[in-house]
Amino acid sequence: MKPLQNTFNKYLFFLFSLATFIFLPAKLFADTDLRDFLNSDKFLDIALTKVSKYNQLFFIPASETMTIEAGNRQIYSGKTQKITIQAIKGNQMKLQIGSEKSLQLGGSVKIIPSADTTSYIQIKLSQRTSFSFRGNITVFSKNSTLKIINSVFIEDYLKSVVPSEIPPSAPLQAIEAQTVAARTYAIRNFNQHKKDNYNLCDSVHCQAYTGIAKEDSRTTKGVVNSIARILLAPSTKEPANTVYHSNCGGYLISSQAAWGGKAVSYLVGHYDGIKGYKPFCYFGNRYFKKQSLSGMPDKKQKLVVGVTPPYAKQKLFPSSGHRVGMCQDGATGMAACGYSCTQILKFYYPGTQLVKLNYGLSDSIRLIDDSYNKPKGTIADKPSATKDPLSAITDALKTKDPRILTTVSQTKQPEILTKSGKDMIKEAAERIKKQQEREKEAEKAKLKNKVEEIKTETLKKIKLPVTPATKKVIKK
């Protein structure tokens, strides 16, 4: 009986172990890479594809001292000097430090400038062409070509990415929103090129990254203001898929409509604006062109995402990009209207949670803005302004205001554009004509009443009876 019981127990243990493995949440595995990143030194390895096509390069660290490692051993530590590396056959390299004799090496070479917030490494392609990058540089040879990896702190990485993705002239709130989206995207995808032994590439395949040359004090301020902030997806609590694009043309589409697959709750299709107003991307585009922004919605109005059908394809204006997630021109338009960074993020990634990464601490994630994550009602369908858009156009026509087209109403329902700008203007012109006719009739009636009053007063003064006959005499 005992052997049978032991066999049964072993069988139960096997079934329990199998069930535990099968039903173990996928999130446990999904979190591993993120936690590894959060508990590391927060550096990203970026493949510099733009400079990884030459067989000889020159490196000049902008620091007093530098260290060079070959594989796991240090081969130089001292005063900064010019470094020349040349690719040769067999995935080998020739390394020359200053005027010293060159060394032939296999594997990789790592250049580390002295620890300084202002230090960087200049990579010279020729006398006139060079690129500069913060952090460390790793070089290896493949097929007689030098391949370059830049290990850079994520916040320094963003100082170059953000101005590469959104113009520095954009309002600060839009820059901050772009920074949060870019940071979240980088962390979510930081193992995109794991099989290639680096995290991300420098092209738009991941995010555009060109080093120090692209940095701008205005976008750097946006990076600093939003430091360490990312968005978490509503259900999984993992970094959200914060995709973004240049201009949605007035309507965002869902990720399902763009790429197929399962629906993503925070990547839905909806009108890029407030009902009764032009879309935010329209104002963002005009902002960059330094044109009139009249007719914008009041920033006090609450925002709501009116979802369109999952495969909606409608547009109001020419678009640029996949139209999923945050519309960069739309974010600029929202910021120009007075909306904050958190309002912009909430509008383009509804339901996500804003958190802050505590770099260097064991408690790596914490909620930083609870008000962002709590719904505070929804927006009004109509603007709170006293005048409707048609009245605004009417007033503009009366005064010959050149901003007339900016107040054209868009839709009552996000799916249907009920009236074009020309129709609105025609209707407004007809309204003006009728109003002028009414005013003319009112003026005639007023004048007639005044004449009657004068006649009556005159007859009373000369002590004659006030009758229709005597009034006719007065008229004559």
Image: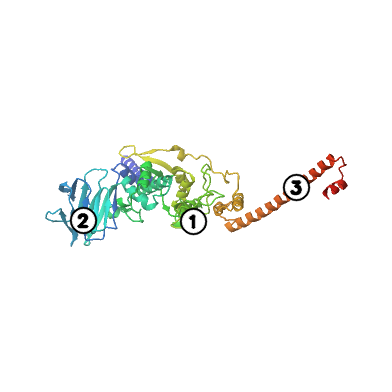
Cβ–Cβ under 8 Å for marks 2 and 3: no
Q: Amino acid at mark 2?
A: Phe
User: Percent from the top left, x then y, of residue 423?
Assistant: 61, 58
The kind of secondary structure element at disc 2 is strand
Q: Does any portion of residue 420 appear in the rendered image? A: no
Q: Disc 1 versus disc 3: distance between alpha carbons?
A: 54 Å
Q: Going 69% across and 53% down the picture, which residue do you hit?
A: 434
Q: Position of residue 6 (x, y in %)?
A: 32, 41
Q: Quadrant of the N terminus?
A: top left
Check the image and report above or below for 99 versus 367. Answer: below
Q: Which mark identifies residue 249?
A: 1
> Disc 2 vs disc 3: which is toward the camera?
3
Q: Which residue is mark 3?
A: 447
The local crowd at label 1, few if under 14, some if 14 to 19, many if 20 or more residues have their Cα within 10 Å, is many
Residue type at tag 1 = Gly
Task: Please tell me how many numbered marks the rendered image carries.
Answer: 3
406 relative position to 449: left or right:
left
Which amino acid type corresponds to the residue marked 3 in the rendered image?
Leu
In the image as oriented, which residue stretches furthest toward the front? Answer: 462
What residue is disc 2 on? Answer: 58
| SS label for mark 1 | loop
Occupied quadrant, residue 236: top left
Q: Residues within 10 Å of mark 2 (few under 14, many from 20)?
A: some
Which numbered disc flags the more N-terminal residue, 1 or 3?
A: 1
Which residue is painted at 53% across and 44% down in the image? Answer: 298
Q: CA distance from mark 1 to mark 2?
A: 45 Å
